[in-house]
Image: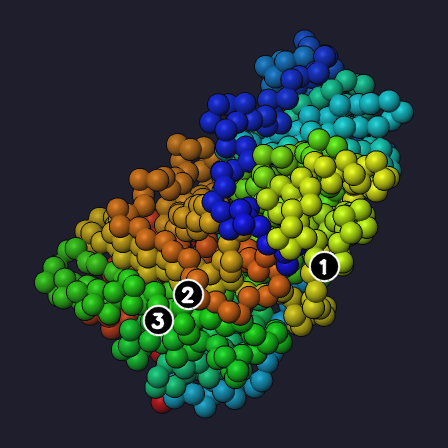
Amino acid sequence: MSATSNSNPSVGLASPHESAHMHVTGEARYTDDIPEPRHLLHTYIRYSERAHARLTKFELDAVRQAPGVAEVISAADMQATTNDIGEGFPGSLVFAEDEVQFHGQPLFAVAAESLEQARSAAMLATVEYEDLPAILTIEQALEAGAEVNDRKEWTRGDPQAALEAAPHRITGSVHTGGQEHFYLEGQNSVAVPNEDGQMLVHCSTQGPTEVQHAVSKVLGVPNNAVTVETRRMGGGFGGKETQGAWFAAMAAVLAQRTSRPVKVRLDRDDDMTITGKRHPTYIQYDVGFDDDGRILGMDLLQAADGGYYPDLTGPVADRALWHADNAYFIEHAHIISHRCRTHKQPNTAFRGFGGPQGIVGIENIMEDIARHIGRDPLDVRKVNFYGIDERNMTPYGQVIEDNILHDLVPQLEQESDYARRRQAVREYNASHTYLKKGLALTPVKFGISFGNPWQNQGGALVHIYTDGTVQINHGGTEMGQGLHTKVNQVVAEALGIDLDQIRITATVTDKVPNTMPTSASTGTDLNAAAAYNAVKRILDRVRPLVRDHYDVGTNENIEFRDNAVHAGERRLCSFVEVVNLAFMNRVQLSSTGFYATPRLHVDEKGWGRPFHYFAYGAAVAEVLLDTLTGEYRMTQVDILHDVGRSINPGIDMGQIEGGFLQGAGWLTTEELYWDDAGRIRTFAPSTYKIPACSDLPSRFNAKFYERSDKIEAAIHRSKAVGEPPLMHGIAVLHAIKDAVAATVDYRRSAPLDAPATPEAVLRALDAIRDDTPRHDPASATPATRATETVVSK
């Protein structure tokens, strides 16, 4: 998918991030750095101090009369338009109404001359509650039948018969915790009222169009009266896909009512208290298998904690379903997905979007099978891999056409020296009583595309100016991941010019409309392809002019490369000269571009072909565990990851390294805790531990898999790299499980939930030695479960 054959190409080079020089100097502007408009008002949000309660007294008169206060809004002030900004899934309220549904739910917002005045005024409100019963755990929600979306259920083959006929059968379960996005830049919006009822919103959001729709709804104006602009974000990770609209809506209503600009900027504690997280998940399974560990039948339950509002729980749970298989063929399967409603923050998108939770479940099954039959877990994983031309149908009906794991995993085995290290780990553990090593190799097969086929579309706008410079606007947003840089490279390659001639402007809804959020790892696939198509349309207009002007035989002979136009080896003119030739001959040098991902279709159950292609990879993690304290450290990590043909190897390697560490953090150190009253207690860096660079092992080897010839037709045959590497962190969890299993000579699987904090590891060590039921640390209310029930024939 290339228009040129540059001798100095842009695609494939590790070009610096387009804003790197501004990041280093501090010149890069984020929403909070925009020069404040005159008469700007600052906002403070007062939120619920109960998880579930009836508001018995709610008086704001003292707030309104406080010094500096310009306006106060609550649910009562939203009734003229709407208090519900749910996009596609109604039920997401801007403010609490008669009842509060989670600790941290916004009650009202105060706009004042300064943030200090707004905060002081908000504390003057009289708020009294009558507590109501609260659902705080997935188990409680399942028992009560409380769900934010309808459950989904799949059956393929005859799983019950396969289970009953299997030589071996085990049941088990695993919890995964949530994860705070912890973006460096918090939620931030500035609403500026313009003439004739129009509103300009600067917003730190992954979904400018979704913000546009939310603001339009709460203001009661059409979409064309609202413009949303996002130049860049200081991180998003999914936390700004939908929830930025929450605060933009508040800012816009306050701006409309006061006719003054309004800023809503959350501090870290309030951000972590109000906003949703990655979905905690409970997975329960009943699996039958043969003597080699090959799965013959599976009955699986997934239950996601959606919090109280629907938000994106439905699509997230769908993707967890689609990744319940990971890399493994399961011919007979029954899978049910519950989308639980609890009295907690509405959980939302997070890098991987449910896929990591689904993969943790099946990898736990592989571990349990291996311990039951006394095999290395890697052997069990390999025997269950999808085939190449057979055993390649997923439980949801998509045929795997691009499987490379049969080559990728052996390559990683060899390069990481897995077999020798496995033997060395066993020898070390046999000679050490309190220190144990663990080793694990886990694969990933991650589907690329939005789950709804209609979302897989992108738009772009490209202008070429008469001095030969180019300006691009597209529907994707930049959150540090390098999307703009890759789009620049694709356009530079197509035009045959240098990168420094190209500039990308802020993502703005009045330039490219109806955009999709930058998520699902589709940013480059959709937006770079749209920009490429815009350039192609311009060049298709210019080529006939060049052909006739320079007496070139056919359009096909004309190439744009090396900042010039060529016909074969003949140089015709510079790029600037051809641009001016086109301008003087009234050839349009501007174009929109559009791209729609092909071959996607999904029915209402989620069956079909939801993914354009799959990204693959595998990781080996080794850990050293102190069984007296439960503490551990990574000693070596090796990653081999499939990026197709990389557009920017530097950016892609950064995504692999960062994604791995974020995934490892989710599964090890990042523990979210709610007390018995439903109050989140991990709402600051002092109580919530994200991994740091120092947590990486000294031996860290990450490498691209470069032998793939099964690459779908994504732009320049590249593959998405935003989300798939996060799953490599699962290898760390299983290395810890391996070390715990070593304490009983690998006779049993370690009953270890995530996050695997030292306390959780100590509980797993006690449980595996006693082989007794244990308390579940993943919820505020303890729930016991058996670690494993084994039935053998």
Q: Distance between the residues labelled 3 and 1?
A: 43 Å
Kind of residue sitting beneath label 2: Pro
Which label's residue is closer to the chain start, 3 or 1?
A: 3
Check disc 2: other Cα within 10 Å, few if <14, some if 14-19, many if 20+.
many
Q: How far apart are marks 3 and 2 (CA)?
A: 11 Å
Kind of residue sitting beneath label 3: Pro
Query: What residue lies at 10% left-to-right and 63% top-to-bottom?
Result: 431
Relative side of 663 to 247, left or right: left
Q: Where is residue 500 in the image (x, y as percent from the top left)?
A: 58, 34
Dot 3: element: helix
Residue at label 3? 410
Outermost right residue: 196
Which label's residue is closer to the chain start, 3 or 2?
A: 3
Dot 2: element: strand
Residue at label 1? 556
Query: What residue lies at 40% left-to-right and 63% top-to-bottom?
Result: 618
- The residue lying toward the viewer, choosing from 405 and 97, is 405
Query: What residue lies at 73% left-to-right and 26% top-to-bottom?
Result: 191
- The residue lying toward the viewer, choosing from 233 and 541, is 541
Q: Position of residue 471 (x, y in %)?
A: 69, 36
Q: Distance between the residues labelled 1 and 2?
A: 44 Å
**Label ID, residue 443:** 2
